[in-house]
Amino acid sequence: MVSQTPNSLTLEEQTVYEEKPLRSRTWRAFWRHPLGLAGVIGLTSIVLFCFVGPLIYPASAYATHINALMSPPSAQFPLGTDDLGRNYLARLMLGGQVSLIVGFAAAIASMIIGVGYGLISGLAGGVVDAIMMRIIDVLLTIPTLFVLLFLDAVFQPNALLLTIILAITSWFGVTRIVRSEVLSLKQRDYVEASRAFGASNWHIMLHELLPNVMGTVMVATIFQIAGSIISIATLSFLGLGLPAPAPNWGEMLSTSMNYMFQNAWWLIYPPGIALLWTLLSINFISEALQSALDTRL
């Protein structure tokens, strides 16, 4: 068997040949970044705590214990109980599931909307691009928190509705990033060559432009996950999140504020630490990924 060298490969084969070590260098740079490893470990630990923890500690998050109201941590209740006698550890794990699922789902949905809109706007150019961007400019003038509060007050909130609300109010930034990248990329030689060979705009978007903006999109999406989790916590803290008795970290923090001066520290610190740990882990991952992509370039 005769081995092929990079110089003997066709243009398409050489592109694949060069992309593999490029991806490998990117991931090596990510894993070598101290924040990347710390972020992955931190986020993994939170995911395991929220989703695997209930399997190891299958206590009810809704059952009330009348004889153990506001009970401090003990062998029976490792993180104590709240003002209604509910197991705080069980509620912390279940509340983390809600925050993570809605946060990730909303970020992914906003990424899909933003990437599609940005690709179409950037590739179309001209009047179409101008109109689409003016629409984004108008939408950006509307305070996001006001929209969230309004929609959350009008409709009965649930996890699906909250995900949709967060998604439709957070895709504008991704669109502007993608559109900016596309305006630059569509002038490259490989895009012009693809167009000269009769490739459709759909083909160019999916095969020429989308793969080259995904790195930037991944970083923006990871930041958006953190933003969505903060939005969930903010709404719940203001009493406009998911209805009781469904727990989430924002609602738990809001409730704990009522007992700040009663030395009920076990109600305040656990949700705050869990929220901070999650946000720091996500930001560490995004910082390391952005650094790895910059190193690649």
Image: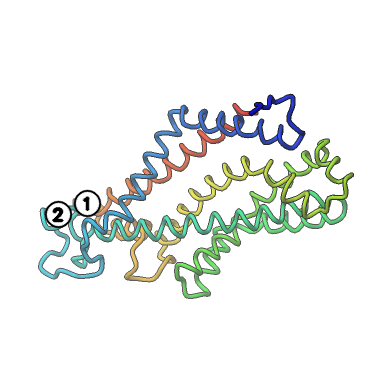
Q: 47 left or right of 73? A: right
Assign a secondary structure to mark 1: helix
Picture quadrant of residue 259: bottom left
Label of residue 72 in the image: 2
**Residue at 13% across / 70% down in the picture?**
66
**Residue at 54% across / 60% down in the picture?**
166
Report the amino acid beneath label 2.
Pro
Report the amino acid beneath label 1.
Trp
Mark 1 lies on residue = 266
Image height of 209 relative to 132, above or below: above
Assign a secondary structure to mark 2: loop
Image height of 125 relative to 168, above or below: above
Q: Is there a contact, CB below 8 Å, between mark 1 and mark 2? A: yes
Q: Position of residue 88 (x, y in %)?
A: 23, 58
Image height of 216 relative to 33, above or below: below
Q: Quadrant of the C terminus?
A: top right
Q: 90 left or right of 211? A: left
**Residue at 21% across / 57% down in the picture?**
57
276 or 289: nearer the viewer: 289
Name which of mark 1 and mark 2 comes first in the sequence: 2
Classed neighbour count for the residue bearing mark 2: other residues with Cα under 10 Å, few (<14), some (14–19), many (≥20): some
Q: Position of residue 124 (x, y in %)?
A: 83, 52
124 or 256: nearer the viewer: 124
Classed neighbour count for the residue bearing mark 1: other residues with Cα under 10 Å, few (<14), some (14–19), many (≥20): many
Label of residue 277 in the image: none
237 or 297: nearer the viewer: 297
**Residue at 25% across / 54% down in the picture?**
267
Q: 287 left or right of 142? A: left
Image height of 3 relative to 278, above or below: above
